[in-house]
Amino acid sequence: MTWTELVMSAAPMQGDQPAVSDVRSGEVLSYAAFARRVTRAAAGLRDCGLRYGDRVLVDVPLGAALPVAVHAVAWAGGVAVLAESGESRLMIAHNRVHPGAKVEHVFSFGPAPGARPFSDLLGGGAVEFGPLAGPALSLDGERLYDNDELATDLRRLAGRLVVGRDDVVINAVSEPFRGLRVIDLAMMAGAHVVVPHEPTLVGCRVLAAERRATMVVAPYDLARRLLGDPVLRVVDERAVVSSLGP
């Protein structure tokens, strides 16, 4: 399986079960909705002229929209560049376009001057099969990670950090790429990820109680202070650090 196939693999079984809950926006992304949006947005990107290997700027914070944007680009055969500025024909933004972004077409999840709604990408067909190989992700626009690297690394992470289908995981990491890897890992297992609005000690404790969380991934200082709850598995975010990124 390719990287995105691994992340979508639980969708047929999990269906309308929640995959990612975004506390900031209030959105609850189901497994079925994730697969549907990724495959349709991939078709929309191709209709906009995306070719294999083309780079697409992705400036979206950690939450329910980030995995949709990144995996839609990868499933279309493009390279998702996690950056707010740079040169590219296409960009997917959250609700603003950075002045340093030199792009022709912008699709935004929220209202942004000069951008079209991300939903415009979903109106056509769907890409049934994504690329089997080739570059899919970049953190800086220079070093490219291909589908095989990303899939292999995700399997390795799964061997080190076991997540089960019944887990509810609070994703309180400090950096978007690590947060994306936590979402990838949890979704591959069929778990439910909750992304807090503000990953503070009190916020995480309240969220853990409200959502009946079984696991939290957080920076060392926060993880250390969350220890002691008998039903909450606390993981230092450094456990998801891989050979791929920060």
Image (spheres, rainbow, N blue to C red):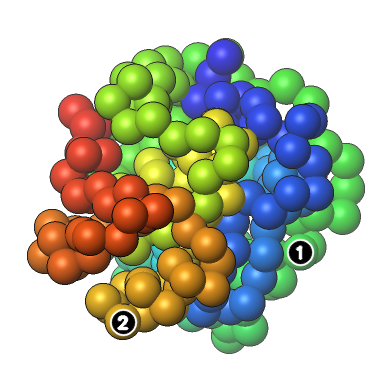
Residue 68 coordinates in the image, percent (x, y): 60, 51
Kind of residue sitting beneath label 2: Val
Residue that appears at 53% across and 62% down? 212
The residue wearing badge 2 is 202
Image: 43 above or below 217? above
Q: Quadrant of the N terminus?
A: top right
Image: 137 above or below 207? above
Residue 123 coordinates in the image, percent (x, y): 87, 55
Most distant residue in the right direction: 124
Q: Earlier in the sequence, mark 1 or mark 2?
A: 1
Callout in the foreground (1, 2): 2
Crowding at dot 2, Cα within 10 Å, few <14 / some 14-19 / many 20+, comes out as few
The residue wearing badge 1 is 119
Residue that appears at 59% across and 63% down? 21
Kind of residue sitting beneath label 1: Ser
Total marks in image: 2
- Along the line of sight, which residue is nearer the eye, 33 or 53? 33
Q: Is residue 131 left or right of residue 82?
A: right
Label 1 secondary element:
helix
Image: 36 above or below 90? above
Residue 23 coordinates in the image, percent (x, y): 53, 75
Crowding at dot 1, Cα within 10 Å, few <14 / some 14-19 / many 20+, comes out as some
Circle on res. 194:
none
Residue that appears at 22% across and 32% down? 242
Residue 87 coordinates in the image, percent (x, y): 38, 56
